[in-house]
């Protein structure tokens, strides 16, 4: 690159040539139907950078605090791509200014980057991964979570409750809604299938009758034959372990067009406006129930409400559900860097491990020995007048 163009690049990014930098990066699906959700997440990260005034002073040295927004999706898949996520992790590792990796959105993507970043001693903080096996021994596959920690140290953290919690509160809510027979679907991906298994486990413990458990093709044009099977099963509630991107909207449409008067419960992977758009609000009104970690933006109080107010003022729009989690990831990364007191990846990981009683936008919380948040409250939501509407707190 010519020197004059290089100087212009630094000018446009707010960084002076030769200035010391500390960089946060995020790896999220920035193309495909998840884009609306992840755009608000990126905005949340940018807001945290703004509040830090774009700089950090450590040990007498002032560093420019910069942020890079990386896409882990590909046009071919229309969602996260293993090859792209691999490339992002490798790029972060070899970029010496990167001190924290915010991501991923999908639990399957996390399985790829976690061991790489762990071996490099680079902190990874997820605003959205919920598969329990990423952190919790004895819940996932036999080699989890050790397989993601080749160094033996904990370098992966998440600020959302995991699916062992979401599966349980979802099953309890289904029972409260009066369902006695449930038909469980999943998208055959790590997040969706794992969540479906958690819901199945707890539904059985609560005495609900399982009348079906099937994986679907998340790219199918329709599910008419499956709807016939659901009708014949006598199910009163369908639980879908999956996301907007794996056809939750089409399932909702086909249940209605097939004439089923049945409840549909979906997890946090569908808590985005894109789900309403894909399904059509009329197909969700009064029949869909969504579980989500924490509470939605319009139910926030204290520092959470302050975040929502600041977001609206800065971006002239509404944050989607995961924006506050991405903001919290950036906030805790910045806090850990300050507490580490130096530009050192391992020291930052150690500071994250030592996080206790952090007074964040999500409340006051800590990281446990596995890198999980101590927050466990979730919310139940529905759709009214074409918008998500809060119903109740779950897991209380």
Image (cartoon, grey):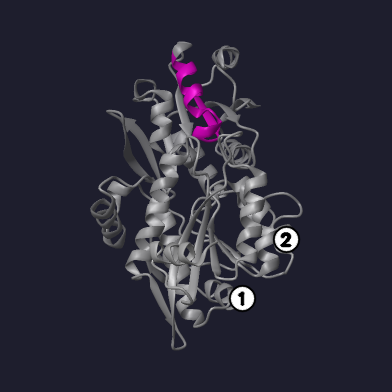
Is the residue marked by circle 2 packed among few (<14), some (14-19), or many (20+) residues within 10 Å?
A: some
Residue under label 2:
146
Residue 289 left/right relative to 219 = left
Q: Is residue 220 magenta?
A: no
| Main secondary structure type of the part rendered in magenta | helix
Q: Is residue 244 magenta?
A: yes
Label 2: which secondary element: helix
Residue 127 location in percent, x, y? 49, 54
- Report the span colored magenta: 237-256
The numbered mark at residue 262 is: none
| Vertical side of 315 occupied by 333: above or below | below
For the point 72% across and 69% down, the residue is 152
The numbered mark at residue 346 is: 1
| Vertical side of 395 occupied by 146: above or below | below
Q: Which is nearer the N-term, disc 1 or disc 2?
A: 2
For the point 55% across and 67% down, the residue is 98
Instruction: Mark 1 vs mark 2: give the one in front.
Output: 1
Give the residue furthest to the bottom.
Answer: 60
| Vertical side of 198 occupied by 385: above or below | above
Out of 301 and 34, give the one closest to the viewer. Answer: 34
Which quadrant does the N terminus fall into?
Answer: bottom right
Label 1: which secondary element: helix
Out of 295 and 2, give the one closest to the viewer. Answer: 2
Residue 259 left/right relative to 372 = left
Give the residue furthest to the right.
Answer: 142
- CA gap, disc 1 to disc 2? 19 Å
Residue 377 location in percent, x, y? 42, 53
Residue 336 visible in image: yes
Is the residue marked by circle 1 packed among few (<14), some (14-19), or many (20+) residues within 10 Å?
A: some
């Amino acid at each position: 690159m010519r020197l004059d163009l290089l100087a212009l690049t630094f000018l446009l990014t707010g960084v002076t040539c030769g200035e010391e930098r500390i960089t946060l990066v995020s790896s999220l699906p920035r193309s495909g139907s998840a884009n609306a959700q992840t755009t608000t997440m990126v905005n949340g990260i940018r807001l945290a950078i703004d509040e830090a005034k774009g700089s950090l002073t450590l040990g007498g040295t002032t560093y420019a605090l910069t942020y890079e927004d990386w896409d882990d999706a590909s046009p071919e898949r229309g969602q996260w791509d293993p090859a792209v996520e691999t490339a992002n992790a490798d790029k972060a590792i070899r970029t010496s200014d990167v001190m924290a990796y915010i991501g991923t959105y999908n639990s399957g993507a996390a399985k790829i980057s976690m061991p790489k970043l762990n071996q490099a001693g680079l902190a990874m903080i997820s605003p959205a991964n919920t598969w329990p096996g990423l952190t919790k021994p004895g819940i996932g596959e036999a080699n989890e979570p050790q397989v993601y920690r080749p160094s033996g140290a904990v370098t992966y953290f998440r600020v959302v409750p995991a699916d062992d919690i979401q599966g349980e509160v979802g099953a309890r809510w289904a029972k409260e809604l009066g369902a006695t027979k449930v038909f469980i679907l999943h998208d055959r991906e790590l997040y969706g299938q794992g969540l479906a298994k958690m819901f199945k486990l707890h539904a059985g413990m609560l005495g609900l009758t399982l009348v079906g458990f099937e994986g679907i093709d998340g790219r199918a044009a329709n599910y008419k034959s499956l709807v016939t099977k659901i009708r014949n099963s006598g199910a009163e509630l369908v639980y879908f372990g999956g996301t907007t991107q794996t056809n939750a909207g089409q399932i909702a449409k086909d249940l209605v067009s097939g004439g089923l008067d049945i409840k549909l419960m979906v997890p946090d992977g569908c808590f985005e406006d894109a789900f309403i758009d894909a399904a059509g609000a009329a197909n969700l009104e009064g029949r869909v129930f969504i579980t989500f970690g924490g509470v939605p933006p319009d139910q926030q109080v204290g520092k959470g409400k302050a975040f929502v107010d600041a977001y609206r003022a800065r971006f002239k729009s509404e944050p989607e559900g995961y924006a506050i989690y991405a903001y919290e990831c950036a906030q805790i990364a910045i806090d850990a860097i300050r507490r580490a007191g130096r530009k050192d990846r391992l020291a930052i990981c150690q500071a994250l491990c030592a996080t206790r009683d952090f007074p964040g936008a999500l409340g006051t919380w800590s990281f446990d020995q596995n890198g999980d948040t101590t927050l466990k409250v979730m919310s139940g939501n529905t759709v009214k007048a074409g918008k998500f509407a809060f119903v109740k707190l779950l897991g209380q």
